[in-house]
Amino acid sequence: MKVLFDINHPAHVHFFRNPIQLLKDTGHEVIVTSRDKDVTLDLLEELGIPNLKLSVAKQGGFFSLLAELLQRVFALSRVVRANKPDVMASIGGTFIAHAGFLTRTQSLVFYDTENAKLQNLITYPLATRVIVPDCYSAWLPRSSERYRGYHELSYLHPSYFSPDESIAKVNGFDDLRDNFIVRVVSWQANHDIGEEGWTPELLLSVVEHLAQRGKVHLVAEGEVPAALTPYLYQGNTSELHHVMARCRLFVGESATMASECAVLGVPAIYAAHTSRGYIVEQQDRYGLVRDMPDFSENTLIETVGEMLQLSSQDYQRKRQVLLEECIDVAAYVVDRISIAAEKSL
């Protein structure tokens, strides 16, 4: 079996890293195509995953994204025709859905972001199959299925990841005080069109408030005010999860990192104007996330105090309930790929 994985974002590297290894371990051939966005290529290199870069992420709005779509679909189609994979897999899947339609190659789209309405509209009808978590709350095509879990359990499930305090310390964790993760994003993805993030003033206020309580690890896309540079995370990108797992709290506008913390048993405050089905479920079902589509400096700081009222042990117990109710997502991904490949033979 020959499988092509199209990687377009750092989170996609993590999602597919274990399925890639599981397939290689059982003798299957894997091809990885990549997109130069943020630390995606750095992560692939750190993890030793050979890849073929097909495009650089565009900035500048709708028309820049459209130009990249056309360029990348053309480049990906050439790779597919040259290598003839049995099946392609990707998160979001716009590129593989279009390339798969043009080359008559099966495409499996894994996704969990409901507000990417335009992307989903031009992707889902062309995909062979769309695969989403149970908590996904938007429209789906008939060729779709659901599973009990979250993307983040493909790489942070206990079967694949065990937090290592020695690795965390090497990457900046301070075991003598509480540690906090703060995350801000660039809002340049296709599902972010029309969205705005935190102001520099709000970020500075939150970081300074948390710094009074412990050590802050700021993870940011793009530049931050000079006053915040001492707080920037300086460790290896591929080892950040070891630091996250030891933190007392996450505060930020990244739904992915909020969910990562939730499945690690670290309480998370997700402060962004658009929510996700998985964030809502992790709040309402497990009490591991606080979803804040409407927020201010005062409400954020008040919520920090509220989330810290429970102990780390309380949140670990909540995490255990989550793990008991969810599946091994990496094994599930491999299973769906294998079934699709059999149909193409």
Image: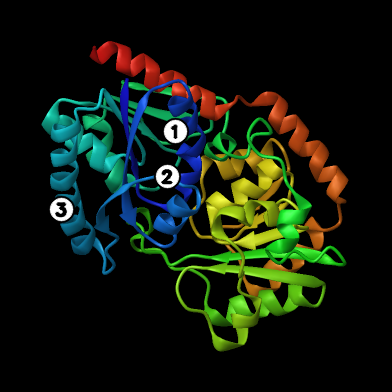
The quarter of the displayed image where residue 318 is located: top right
Disc 3/disc 2 C-alpha distance (Å): 23 Å
Residue 118 image offset from top left, x and y in percent:
27, 47
Contact between marks 2 and 1 (CB within 8 A): the answer is yes
- Going from N to C along the chain, the mark reached first, 2 or 1, is 1
Dot 3 alpha-carbon crowd within 10 angstroms: few under 14, some 14 to 19, many 20 or more = some
- Going from N to C along the chain, the mark reached first, 3 or 2, is 2
Q: Report if residue 299 is visible in the image.
A: no
The quarter of the displayed image where residue 250 is located: bottom right
Tell me the residue that label 2 is attached to.
Answer: 49
Callout 3 amino acid: Gln
- Going from N to C along the chain, the mark reached first, 3 or 1, is 1
Disc 3/disc 1 C-alpha distance (Å): 26 Å
From what the image shows, is residue 159 above or below residue 211? above
Q: Please identify, in this view, whether the residue under mark 3 or under mark 1 is nearer the observer.
A: 1
Q: State the residue in front, 65 or 125.
A: 65
Tell me the residue that label 1 is attached to.
Answer: 20
